[in-house]
Image: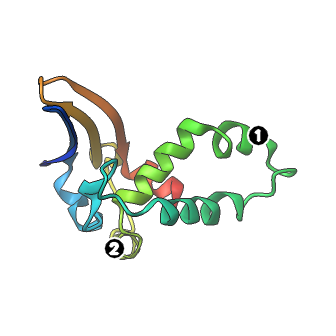
Amino acid sequence: MIKTTHEISDENGYKKYNLFEIHKNLETIIADDYFTYSSNEFKKDSYCELMYKKNFYDKYDKNMYKEVYEKYIDNISFKEKAKFIYSVIDYEKYVEFVEKNKTIENPNDLTISYSVLDSHGVKVNMYNISIADIAFVF
């Protein structure tokens, strides 16, 4: 397990940090700038929106897939989770990973956990995603 922290804000000494816990087998698909997620340094908003559009709005007709839109595409929580995945996973590296790993045993073991940690030691888990979640949004 790989653990990474990165400061995302500092308001009068009250700091918040990203805390990523990444399964070692997923290290190869992580974007180089993943640690900037939710910080002032994050520059991928438009990329994440484009990926969401490409993988959901452009793929599914709203009239034909009403249930998919209700359950996933128009669901704000789902959209935020998908955009999180797009911000931390490098698409090109993911494609290479899939080509090399045609079969994955125990996909629930391959996880990325994202939490926000503050300067007082309070940790709030935001996302716990598996390779299956990643595959679903791509």
Mark 2, Cα crowd under 10 Å, few <14 / some 14-19 / many 20+, is some
| Precedes in sequence: disc 2 or disc 1 | 1
Query: What's the residue at 24%, 55% (across, down)?
Result: 35
Q: Answer with left or right where residue 63 lies relative to residue 111.
A: right
Q: Nearer the viewer, residue 34 or 118?
A: 118
Three-letter amino acid code at the position of disc 2: Lys
Question: Is 122 located above or below residue 23 in the figure?
Answer: above
Q: Answer with left or right where residue 96 lies relative to residue 32.
A: right
Query: What's the residue at 12%, 23% (across, down)?
Result: 120
Pointer 1: what residue?
67
Question: Is 69 located above or below residue 89 in the figure?
Answer: above
The tag on residue 34 is none
Q: How many marks?
A: 2
Pointer 2: what residue?
93
In the rendered image, residue 30, in percent from the top left (x then y), is placed at 28, 63
Query: What's the residue at 42%, 50% (across, down)?
Result: 84
**Label 2, label 1: how many angstroms apart (C-alpha)?**
31 Å
Q: Nearer the viewer, residue 17 or 87?
A: 17
In the rendered image, residue 78, in percent from the top left (x then y), is placed at 55, 41
